[in-house]
Amino acid sequence: MVRYYSTRGAVTEGVPFSEALLTGLAPDGGLFVPDRIPELPRALPVEDFPALAHGVLLPWVDASFPDAVLADVLQDALNFPVPLVPLSGAGWEGVYVLELFHGPTLSFKDVGARTMARLMGHLVRQRGEELTILVATSGDTGSAVADGFAGQEGIRVVLLYPAGKVSPLQELQLTVRRPGVETYAVAGTFDDCQRMVKGAFVHPDLQGMRLSSANSINIGRLLPQMLYYIQAGLQQDAPPVFVVPSGNLGNLTGGVLAWLGGLPVRYFVAAHNANDFFPRYLQGEDVHPGPSRRTFSNAMDVGAPSNFERLVHLLGPVRLRAHVRGYSVSDADTLTRMRRLYEETGYLADPHTAVGLEVVRRMREEGEQHVPIVVLSTAHPAKFPEIVARALSEVTPEAEALERLKTRPRDAKPLEASTEALVQVLRSSEARLQM
Ligand SMILES: *Cc1c(COP(=O)(O)O)cnc(C)c1O
């Protein structure tokens, strides 16, 4: 059974999966990493994603998740397709797009968030406990996490977003009424929301309450992100190059774990927007994480990637630089790539995926002939209508899941931007009853 210890060394004994899952961050502020990497099982059912997931994840969890429970969790969480779409058109031979956006909130985060939520839900019910998940969001993550946890008995989600500072579509996704989820429109910025959440975690009046953050560093979100690399990789005759549109590097870390478990991979490419800390690090520059810059691929606007520490711990700097290449792509090049790709192949990519596809063009120009190349597609283009319109005025991407949202009841309450106001909310059972 895998045990989890901290990247910063304080958890020398290691903790079982359940504890790493419920606490999220290690007590010394480090990230949980496995004490060993289980080898991938030999025969995995490539056509049956939940069954493949079960085979892969079984050695990573502990005795709180018997075989049948884990199978149910994964069957329920991974209930949408993850198609591998070949591009056709001059210059795109051997390039595949791995579409990870067919879940309920149309981003790859559904894979990790839904799985984590069901794993946590099982633990909470088994232990007869109650858990409150606090999420501060600037857009994408919040809806995936809220949707993932919705309806999980014993779990209450309190979601904060900066009022007026998310796009209309993001606001729609954040504010649809979901069972067990309370959404607050905070009169402040995203940083205020984050400060309030951090304040609540250490607030003396909430010490009896079990709080968790379920953010992207949680091992329960990370491990499921191995699965689609494995499914896609096992369908190929040759080890693929994986190109990963990246921000916090959680998606990439999932791929690296799959590779360390034995999946044949030629190498990985971290495709970043103007937030180029990681590509510069990989080039050997002496860089430091800094503030983020705003771009068209805003779910990747990360100046200090949270999983960097974990990646360096898993591979060490030398292996990391040998197996991962990095590129940075401007907004202008992202838009051009969206338009050209559509003209050349008929494929409409969202701005995040387009960063990855632009990187493929550059690799080809630099002489990289390897096939296959698999580009992870992290979001549906219909989530970013304003940016698609800038690139291609003649196309309007649509997604049925978004259309359906427009007819659902919405529910968000205003909240003052202070920790005290959040503490009030958390302490009131009334808020819970209103759901
Ligand atoms: C979160 C996100 C990313 C970045 O993933 P990381 O795991 O943070 O590197 C890329 N694209 C989309 C659409 C996302 O939502």
Image (spheres, rainbow, N blue to C red):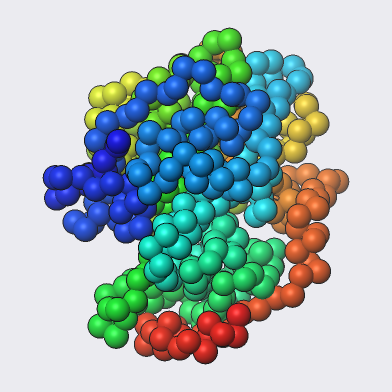
Q: Is residue 106 left or right of residue 124?
A: right
What residue sits 42% from the left and 59% below the top?
Answer: 126
What residue sits 70% from the left and 27% below the top?
Answer: 85
Residue 242, can we see it?
yes
The C terminus, quarter of image:
bottom right
Farthest residue to the right: give it: 394
Q: Is residue 98 left or right of residue 291?
A: right
Taking depth in this image into account, of 328 and 169 the one nearest to the observer is 169
What residue sits 42% from the left and 75% below the top?
Answer: 192
Q: State the count of labels.
A: 0
Q: Quadrant of residue 268?
A: top left
Taking depth in this image into account, of 28 and 35 the one nearest to the observer is 35
Percent x, y of residue 40: 42, 23
Percent x, y of residue 171: 65, 69
Percent x, y of residue 9: 15, 45
Q: Looking at the picture, does residue 357 appear above or below residue 323? A: below
What residue sits 81% from the left and 69% below the top?
Answer: 407
Q: Looking at the picture, does residue 35 appear above or below residue 423? A: above
Percent x, y of residue 93: 69, 15
Residue 217, can we see it?
no
The N terminus, quarter of image:
top left
